[in-house]
Every structure is written in structure tokens, then in C-alpha cells.
Image (tube, grey):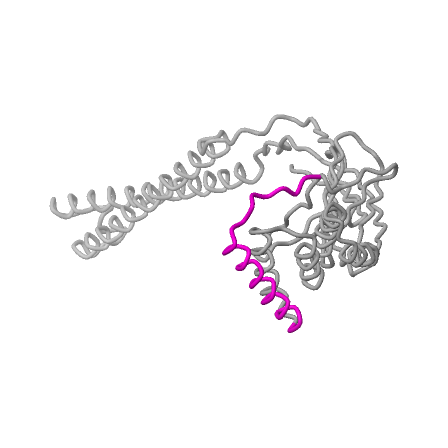
Amino acid sequence: MSFAQSAPSKTELQTAKTLFTEAQADETAQRWEAALEKLERAAAIKKTAGILSHIARCKDHLGRLRDAAGDYERAREMARAEGNGAVLAVVESTLKALRSRIPAIHVVVQKRPGLEVQVRTESPDGTEIPVQSERLTRLMDGYQVEVDPGDYVVAATAPGFKPYREVRHMAEGHILVHQVVLVPEPPPAPRVTIPTAAPLEREGFWTGRNSVTIAMLGAGLLATAGGIGFALASQGDAREAGRLRGQVLWSRSACAQPTESSTSETCTQLSDTLDAQQTHARVSVGFYAAGGALILGGAAVWLLWPKAKPRTRGGYVVPRIDIGSRTVGLQGAF
């Protein structure tokens, strides 16, 4: 492994030394973020095993255990290259203890075609970020990944199965064996179509029943109106007959042997008027009878006319199986 850097100037070396001294003061005060920022600036000028070990220490206290382990490993290699036994001894003992504190998730899942397993963590804005795929170690029964302490989402997908997702909290030193059980997607419900008769076409208003009924009711009303007209004419004849009786002081003997021509003429008019009254009365009764019969007949036609039998429309029935609620039922339309 090469750690070669371009040779810094004396001014840059003095700046790196000042930053390192200030970072040590921040470490003593447990200002780990401030110390890390100064140490990284110093390492950019001149990277040494000592600076790398302090960077790893800051990341360790900030909960970035995996990054800290990586920096300790680089510090160990650099201490060996520099022959710095003191730093090497501290780094090796610290790295061994740190390794035992790094959490790991062991995802156990049955191999399936198209299977994809992810371990995700949440960013500050709530977005789930997958752990880099190169950190997932493939095992015989699944995958394993080292993570920092915190909350993680274990997710898995495979064609024909419901997506799997579960949140797990990882503490320092926690080795989690997480069993993933994929649930098959339910097959689509079969659609069963029930053949039925064609739907009945909507009939218009002028059906045979309506036409006959309206014709009979109309004729009945016209006959009743005619009866009323002849009844009124009969009443007019009755009034005229009364007037003529008053003129001749009518009696059977007066019109049987009229003595004057005027009386004879009046008696003739009276006789004709009485005949007309009786005729109009009889015709009026006939019209009334015919009108009533037609109206009753129309009502009978409306009530007794055979009605068309309704036909059912086409429909379907779909059996539904809900695995989540463990229910079985039917759904359809008619």
C-alpha cells in the first residue's frame, strides 16, 4: 500500500502541527466534530499514522464505527511502513476492541429467481438510502453486512412475492440474525361469466295496451259528451213544451178538437216538441250507456292486458380470496 504525498513546505508543516495540537485540545474537551475537522485538514497536508489514529478515534466517538475501523486499519499499515511501534501497538489493541463493537445484520432468506435484498438507513430528510452493495457479504443462507448503530430497514423483493420490509434497531455489538419470509402474491381472481338472456329492449309509449286503452277511453269520453249534449237538448225541449202549454192552456180536449187555426198550429208544435224531448232523452241515455261501457272497457284492457315478462341482464360473478383477512366471498354484477 502506498502512502506517498508531495513534500509539504515548512509553512504547511507548521500549519499541520498547529491543527494537530488544537485537535488534541478538542479531543480532551470531547469536541469530536471540531477535532475531526482539524485532523482531516492536517492529514491533507501530511498524513501520518498518528493523525490517522486520531481521526479514527474521533469517528469512533461520533458513532461511525465502520469508518473508524477503516481508518485504524490504514493507520496500522502506515505505522508498519514508518516503523512506528508505539502507534502500531495502540492501533492494533484499539482495532481489536472496536471490531467487537460493530453491529452486523445477518439476513437469512431462501434463494429465489430475481431475489433482491437491501439493508437501508434513513437520511436526515427521511429518504431511505441503501447500504452500499459491496458491503453485503453473500453467505450460504443469505447475506451479512456490518452497520453503524442505529435504525435500519431490511427489504427484499422477488417476482411473484409481496415486497418485504421491516425496521430493526442495531446497538453496539449487536449481531442480528434476521429471517426473511416472502409471502406469495395471491393469484388473480378468476372471472366467471354467467350467460343470460339478452336484455329486454325498452318499449315505446304507443304499445298495443296503451293504444287500445287510450282509444277506448277517448271514445267513452266522446260518447259521454254526446249524452250530455242530448240531455241538454231534451231539457230545452221540456222548457219549450212548457211555454207552448201555457199558450193553449193545454189539455187533452183542447188539442183533440182545436177551435181556432192558431190553437191547432200551437198544438202541432207542442206535439212535435214533446216527441223531440223523448227522442233526445232516449238518445242521451244511449250515449251515456255507451260512454260508460267504453270507459270501463278501457280500464279493463289496461288491467288485464298481458304484460311482457322481464328478462335478466347479463352478469358475472367473481370469487374473491383475501389472504390477509382470511376471508372467501363472491363479487359480481347483474
- The segment highlighted magenta reads 1-29
Residue shown at 72% from the left, 59% from the top: 150
Q: Position of residue 112 (x, y in %)?
A: 81, 32
Which of the pair 152/253 is nearer the observer?
152
Q: Give left or right: position of 263 versus 285.
A: left
Query: Residue pushed farthest right?
Result: 140
Q: Position of residue 235 (x, y in %)?
A: 28, 51
Dominant secondary structure of the magenta stretch? helix
Asked which quadrant contains residue 317, the reply is top right
Residue shown at 25% from the left, 44% from the top: 271
Residue 179 in view: yes
Which of the pair 267/183 is nearer the observer?
183
Residue 147 in view: no
Q: Is residue 11 magenta?
A: yes
The quarter of the rendered structure image containing the N terminus is: top right
Q: Position of residue 312 (x, y in %)?
A: 64, 33
Q: Is residue 147 magenta?
A: no
Vertical placement of residue 11 versus 182, above or below: below
Asked which quadrant contains residue 332, the reply is top right
Query: Residue pushed farthest front?
Result: 10
Asked which quadrant contains residue 26, the reply is bottom right
Q: Position of residue 229 (x, y in %)?
A: 30, 44
Query: Residue pushed farthest bottom?
Result: 29
Residue shown at 70% from the left, 64% from the top: 61
